[in-house]
Image (spheres, rainbow, N blue to C red):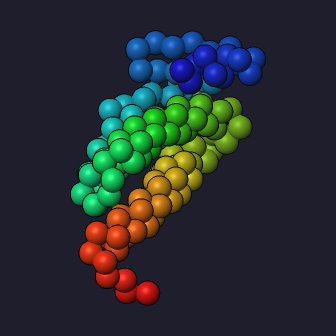
Amino acid sequence: LAKSALSLFGWDISVSDRLIVIEGYRAVEVLNGCNALSLMALYSGFIISFKGPNQKRVFYLLGGIGMIYFLNIFRIMAFSLATVYFQPLWDTFHEFSPFLFFYPFVLWIWYKWTLLSEDTFRSDSGLSFY
């Protein structure tokens, strides 16, 4: 999908196995640790472990995992473009990319889920701490 999206913007892209190459520049290799599966598992575990309505839990699980997937595609596209525009800073960009692409979204969704969880707890127990 990253190749198709970059091609739409006019980049000459080739893909070979796990490598994405903008012609004339360094390749970006997508390794197993770069596919965001561990983040999807961590995200899912958090949503499952906190109490909340099951219908909304399914929505948060599927929607969150889908967004992490698309954010990762965007991240891979950014890595490819970084080989063109920011080659000397590529390693730094790679190291800090989760802070730019994943963590703000995941922390926001987790926060929203805990608020929903808290509302469910208050309505179930009849107690309010506010």
Residue found at the very far bottom of the displayed protein: 130
Rendering coords of residue 113 (x, y %) = 41, 59
Residue found at x 50% / y 39%: 67
Residue found at x 57% / y 12%: 14
Say if residue 129 shows up in the picture.
yes
Residue found at the very far front of the displayed protein: 126
Where on the picture, by quarter, is residue 41?
top left
* Nearer to me, 100 or 47: 47
Rendering coords of residue 53 (x, y %) = 33, 53
Could you tell whether 57 is left or right of 15 in the image? left
* Nearer to me, 53 or 82: 53
Where on the picture, by quarter, is residue 17?
top left
| Total numbered badges shown on the rendered structure | 0
Say if residue 72 shows up in the picture.
no
Q: Is residue 44 above or below residue 11?
A: below
Where on the picture, by quarter, is residue 74?
top right
Quadrant for the C terminus, please: bottom left
Could you tell whether 6 is left or right of 57 in the image? right
Rendering coords of residue 95 (x, y %) = 48, 51
Rendering coords of residue 128 (x, y %) = 37, 83
